Amino acid sequence: MLLTEWRLHADAAGAPMKRGFTAASFASAALFALAPGFAVGGALGFAMLLLVAGLLSIRPSLVLTAWKKRPVVIGLLLTFTAWAVLSVAWSPYEAAEQGLKVALLVPVGLMFAAAATADADMRRLTAAGGLATVIVLIVLLAIEAGLDMPFNRAAQPDIDPGQLVRNVGRGAAFLVVVAWGAVAGLLAIGGGARFATAALVLASTAAISLQFDQFANAVALAAGLSAFAFAFALPRFGVLVVTGGLALWALIAPFATPLVLSNQRLVDALPLSWAARAGIWDYVCARILEQPLIGHGLEASRTVEDRIQVRELDMRGIPMHPHSASLQIWYETGAIGAVLAAAALLLGGRWLARAYGDDRASAAGAAGTIAAVGVIANVSFGAWAEWWIATMFIAAAIVGSVRAR
C-alpha cells in the first residue's frame, strides 16, 4: 500500500519516481510500515524505530543543509536539550540514563525529519507513508475500541486491563497528533475524492479520540481542528498565533495556573481525574518557586514523596511527572529551560510562518499538529517520555512532506 501511494503521488506531481531505495528511504518506509502496530501496542517502541531510522538517515551533506536553512531554531532546540541533560548533575533522581536517551533522540529525530523531507522523492515517500500509517492505525484502533482490545489482550493476556487501556490511549494520542499532516496532504492534492478521504480520515480520528477514557485526546482533536481551520484561512498568522500561544504558556504557566485554580467552584466542578491534575499543578507551582532559575534537575519529579489530598484521594504531590510539559520544564530545568523552550517555539513558528505563508495546506497541517501536541503535552504525558519525543519528530516529518502532494 505504501509503495502504491508513493507511485500515485509521484504521478500526480508529474515527476519521475526513483527506482530502488536508499538507506534513508528504506528506514523511512520501514518506520511507517511498523508504526501502526507499535502504536496500538502502546507506542513505547517508537523511540527505537526513530533511533534506527535517524541513524540510517545521517549524511554530512544533509546535516549541513539542515543547519544552513534553520540555524537559530535548530541551535535553540539543541541548546534546550543540552541544558535539560546538564540538569542531571543536580537532580536527586538517578537520571543519567534518561538524559542519555534525550540527548540521542533529539538530534536523531532532527536528522530523520530532515532526511524524510530532503527532496521531492523523499517527501512523496513520507507523504504516502504518513497517510498509510494514519489509515491503518484508524482501522486497528477501531477494532480495539469495538471488540474490547483483542490485539492487546492477545499480546499481553496477563496484563491488567487498565494498563491495556493506557496502551491504546497512547496509540490514539499518536493518531491525533499525526493525522493533521495526512489530512493536509490530501487537501493539497485537491479533487473530490481526496477531499472526501480527508473528511473521512478526520471524522474517524475524531471518533477514535473519544475512546479509551482519554478525554485529553478529544480536547487535543478539537484544538487541532480549530488551529487547522484558522491557519488554512490565514496561513502565516495562524501559525504565529498557535506557536506564540504555546510559547507564552510555557513562560507563564507557573504563575497563571494558580490564578486559574484559585476559582474553587471551577475546581469542584472538575471530574476526579482532572481535579487530581489540578492538585498536582498547584503543588508543582509552589515547588517551582523553591529553585526557580535552574530547577530541581531532570526527572526530579519522580523523587517527590510529599502527599496531597484531592477529595477522597490521598496521592503523591507529583506521581511520576506533573502531567504538564510546561510545568515539568519549569520544575526540572527552571527559568533557563523555560526561556529556551519558549524561544525555540517562537522562532520555530516564525520560520514556519515564512516557509508556509503561501501554502494553506502546509500551514494548516503544521498549526493543527502543534496545537494537538500542545494540549496533550500540557495535560497528559511526561515531557521526556521517549515515545512522545519520537511522536513529535514523526509528525514533523509528515507535515514537512505536504508540499510533495
Image (cartoon, rainbow, N blue to C red):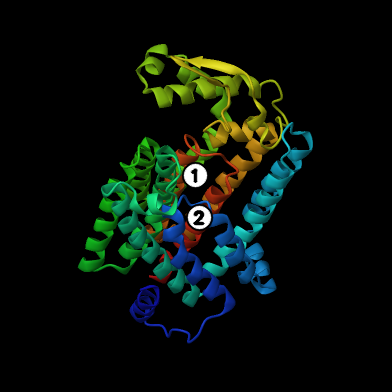
Q: Which amino acid does label 2 sit on?
A: Leu
Whether residue 262 sits left or right of residue 106 in the image: it is left
Which one is earlier in the sequence, the residue at label 2 or at label 1?
1
Residue 90, labelled with which disc? none
Check the image and report above or below for 403 versus 161. below
Work out whether residue 196 can be spotted: yes
Picture quadrant where residue 188 is located: bottom left
Q: Residue furthest top?
A: 264
Residue pointed to by mark 2? 352
Q: Which of the two residues, 283 or 355, is positioned nearer the viewer here?
A: 283
Amino acid marked by disc 1: Thr
Residue 24: image x %, image y %?
57, 73
In the image, 121 versus 2, the foreground residue is 2
Residue shown at the point (41%, 17%) measured from the top left: 267
Residue at the outermost right position: 89
The secondary element bearing badge 1 is classed as: helix
Which mark identifies residue 243?
Answer: 1
Mark 2: secondary structure: helix
Q: Is residue 302 left or right of residue 365?
A: right
Q: In which quarter of the image is the C terminus?
A: bottom left
Q: How far apart are marks 2 and 1 (CA)?
A: 10 Å
Q: List x then y, in percent, for residue 398.
A: 45, 62
Residue 364 showing in the rendered view: no
Q: Label 1: few (<14), some or many (≥20) within 10 Å?
A: many
- Asked whether disc 2 touches disc 1, contact meaning CB atoms under 8 Å apart, the reply is yes
Q: Residue at x 22, y 67 (%)?
A: 193
| Residue 326 picture quarter | top right
Q: Give residue 25's position: percent from left, percent from top.
A: 53, 75
Task: Identify the residue shown where x is 50% and y is 20%.
Answer: 279
Residue located 48% across and 38% down the image? 245
